[in-house]
Amino acid sequence: MFNPFKNKKKTNTNKDEELLIKTACILVHAAKMDENYTEKEKLIIKNALKNLGMKDEVINDSLAKAELIEKNSSQLLDFTKVIKNTETSFKVSLIEALWTIIYSDQNLDMYESNLMRRLSGLLYLDKKIVGDIKEKVKIELNK
């Protein structure tokens, strides 16, 4: 007999996995923006993914998958369309991770700044929230 709820858990797991992979793609994209993708940035991405709910045992494989997807993609929209419908707290955590990646080299270039402006719009986040997170990250990194 057909049970519409039988695969519900699997579907949610697939959506969660897609969300985290797309999130990883955005993080990788930000890390590569300055054409200097470092091990420090990879570590920040791994920690962010863990904090956003990715299990330890899949982080390395998921990061490799995200690097490949990001390399072959030319559109941020593909990454953000899943994320924009998440709770604000998830998006705020993502933005915090992005600013941490961007400022990991103590420098903000115009491409990184432009990326963050675009992402605030694509994720439906107020620019003030994004700016406040930026200032918080800068203060934490300068301690």
Image: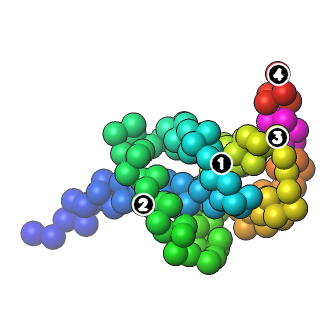
User: Magenta residues?
Assistant: 132-138
Find numbered disc 4 in the image and state the secondary structure of the residue it sits on.
Answer: loop
Q: What is the crowding at mark 4: few (fewer than 14 residues within 10 Å), some, or many (at least 20)?
A: few
Residue for badge 2: 65
Identify the coloring.
Answer: rainbow
33 vs 74, nearest the viewer: 33
Q: Quadrant of the C terminus?
A: top right
Q: Which mark, by number, is residue 106?
A: 3
| Residue type, numbered disc 3 | Gln
Q: Is residue 50 left or right of residue 110?
A: left
Which callout, 3 or 4, points to the residue nearer the camera? 3
For the N terminus, which image quadrant? bottom left
Question: Residue tagged by mark 4?
Answer: 143
Quadrant in the rendering for residue 65: bottom left
- The percent coordinates of residue 74 (x first, y second) are 62, 78
Q: Amino acid at mark 2?
A: Lys
